[in-house]
């Protein structure tokens, strides 16, 4: 790590700006009502600082923009595909690569290739799209993450770790033959951007090898996870993030990637595997759902930007500033006494809505209500990660009631400044000061799949 700077200051300067829209409280009230109190349904024009997601919202570098001009838009065998393949082999070490339009395209294909009806897929906490694809392929997800991950007050540094005892229990119940793979995310999105340790991954590798079970890596934020290992796990301080990333990948058999996160592009993803048979089967399926196996739903220029972004994403100075900015915001909120998930995640800060609004019962959607209050206060758009995101129990039809009821403040990469972080912290503080007056919501429209994207609500009349 560079020791010249103690601050997390950005290793870049700004060359182009995009004007933002400022709104009045009255305008925001109207916009929120029209959006059914769902921040996903707001128009981006009505948003001042957009923390809905870090997915596809990061700023590309001048080199990536230049890469767009080098797009080879041949239907088959585009030179940009080979650049992408080279970047994935070089930085991640996987053998076979299939581009997809984004992460869920890869999840669909890997699920269909590997999961049979009745199978069980253990993982370090579910992710929304990952779980839906596992279920559509006939599988059931089993959570094997350590208990600490479900406790927003626990400061355990590696809440992304797998509990091997829980994995053993799944094997005892269903048998190793019903487990096509263990699904491992770096970092764990739904736990609040929490990393898995190398020691845990190595132990998992050994354990799964013994039982003949694959490990499939959801590597959406692998560079951020590697940075946390460098910071916190003994013996890694002097290693580069690139080196740690490569070791993480080497402990797994294949991967799905949403390149819209770590890899610094606005669209793109891929599926990677070290197994020829899996590759062959996936290559057959990709033509049905995405496109030919050398473009997978992407333009040549998109693949070029992704190839360049992958290289930039594992640069030590880049990742230190990226995670440093998130920590800056998180520490400001902690200092102000706001209940946030600890430790601070790598890609965003998560407000603990149960602690923030203890008077709002979970089936009145406290996190959804809190996200809409923050927007009304300042035009800062955040998102719900709680009961709405968790969906319904397949068997009983009732809501799933997750331990974690969170509002996510997700920071896009290389987009906002420290002054923006200050505005966000001040707004959350103002909402916290009048939290007693915040009421819950009532669900008025509910889509069948991934309901959080399109659900609509109305404000409950205060008691
Ligand atoms: C975003 C994300 C996905 C899905 O990727 P998309 O590109 O949005 O389809 C899968 N897993 C994790 C952990 C993610 O954050």
Image (tube, rainbow, N blue to C red):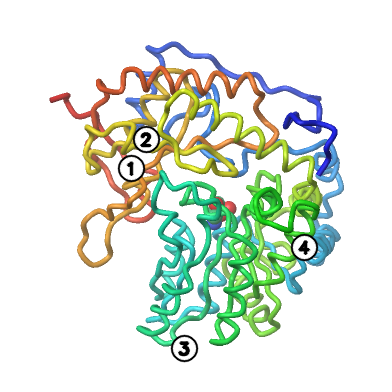
Residue 309 position in % (x across, y down): 77, 48
Q: What separation in Å lies between label 3 and label 1 (alpha carbons)? A: 38 Å
The local crowd at label 2, few if under 14, some if 14 to 19, many if 20 or more residues have their Cα within 10 Å, is: many
Q: Which residue is mark 4?
A: 88
Label pair 1/2, CB-CB below 8 angstroms: yes
* Foreground label between 3 and 2: 3
Residue 420's quadrant in the figure?
top right
Residue beneath label 3, please? Answer: 177
Q: Quadrant of the C terminus?
A: top left
Is residue 271 depicted above or below 51 in this figure?
below
N-term-proximal mark, 4 vs 1: 4
In what element is the residue under mark 4? helix
Mark 2 / mark 4, whichever is N-terminal:
2
- Tag 1 residue: 455
Q: Label 2, on which residue?
A: 38
Residue under the image location 37 percent in, 12 percent down: 26
Q: Quadrant of the N terminus?
A: top right
Could you tell me which secondary element the residue under label 3 belongs to?
Answer: helix
Q: Quadrant of residue 33?
A: top left
């Amino acid at each position: 790590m560079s020791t010249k700077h103690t601050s997390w200051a950005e290793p870049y300067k700004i060359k182009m700006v995009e004007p933002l829209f400022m709104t009045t409280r009255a305008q925001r009230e109207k916009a929120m009502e029209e959006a059914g109190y769902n921040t996903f349904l707001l128009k981006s024009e009505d948003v001042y600082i957009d923390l809905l997601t870090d997915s596809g919202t990061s700023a590309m570098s001048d080199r990536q923009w230049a890469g767009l001009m080098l797009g080879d838009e041949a239907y088959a065998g585009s030179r940009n595909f080979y650049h992408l393949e080279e970047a994935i082999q070089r930085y991640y070490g996987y053998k076979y690569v299939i581009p997809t339009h984004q992460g869920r395209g890869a999840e669909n294909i890997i699920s269909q290739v590997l999961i049979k009806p009745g199978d069980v897929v253990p993982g370090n906490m579910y992710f929304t799209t990952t779980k839906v694809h596992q279920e559509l392929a006939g599988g059931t997800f089993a959570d094997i993450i350590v208990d600490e991950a479900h406790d927003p007050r626990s400061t355990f540094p590696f809440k992304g770790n797998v509990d091997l005892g829980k994995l053993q229990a799944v094997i005892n119940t269903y048998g190793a033959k019903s487990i096509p793979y263990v699904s491992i995310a770096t970092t764990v999105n739904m736990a609040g951007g929490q990393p898995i340790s190398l020691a845990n991954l190595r132990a998992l590798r050994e354990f799964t090898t013994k039982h003949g079970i694959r490990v499939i890596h959801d590597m959406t934020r692998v560079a951020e996870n590697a940075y946390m290992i460098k910071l916190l796990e003994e013996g890694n301080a002097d290693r580069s993030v690139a080196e740690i990333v490569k070791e993480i990948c080497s402990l797994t058999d294949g991967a799905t990637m949403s390149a819209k996160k770590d890899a610094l592009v606005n669209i793109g993803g891929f599926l990677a595997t070290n197994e020829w048979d899996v590759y062959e089967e996936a290559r057959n399926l990709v033509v049905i759902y995405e496109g030919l196996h050398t473009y997978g739903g992407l333009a040549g220029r998109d693949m070029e930007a992704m190839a360049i972004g992958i290289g930039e994403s594992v640069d030590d100075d880049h990742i230190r500033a990226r995670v440093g900015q998130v920590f800056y915001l998180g520490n400001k909120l902690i200092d102000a006494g706001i209940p946030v998930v600890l430790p601070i995640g790598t890609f965003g800060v998560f407000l603990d809505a149960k602690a923030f609004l203890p008077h709002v019962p979970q089936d009145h959607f406290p996190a959804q209500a809190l996200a809409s209050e923050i927007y009304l206060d300042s035009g800062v758009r955040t998102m719900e990660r709680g009961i709405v995101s968790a969906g319904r129990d397949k068997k009983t039809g009732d809501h799933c009631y997750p331990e974690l009821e969170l509002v996510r403040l997700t920071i896009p990469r290389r987009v906002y400044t420290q002054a923006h972080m200050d505005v966000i912290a001040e707004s959350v503080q103002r909402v916290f000061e009048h939290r007693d007056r915040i009421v819950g919501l009532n669900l008025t429209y509910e889509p069948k799949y991934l309901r959080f994207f399109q659900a609509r609500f109305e404000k409950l009349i205060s008691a």
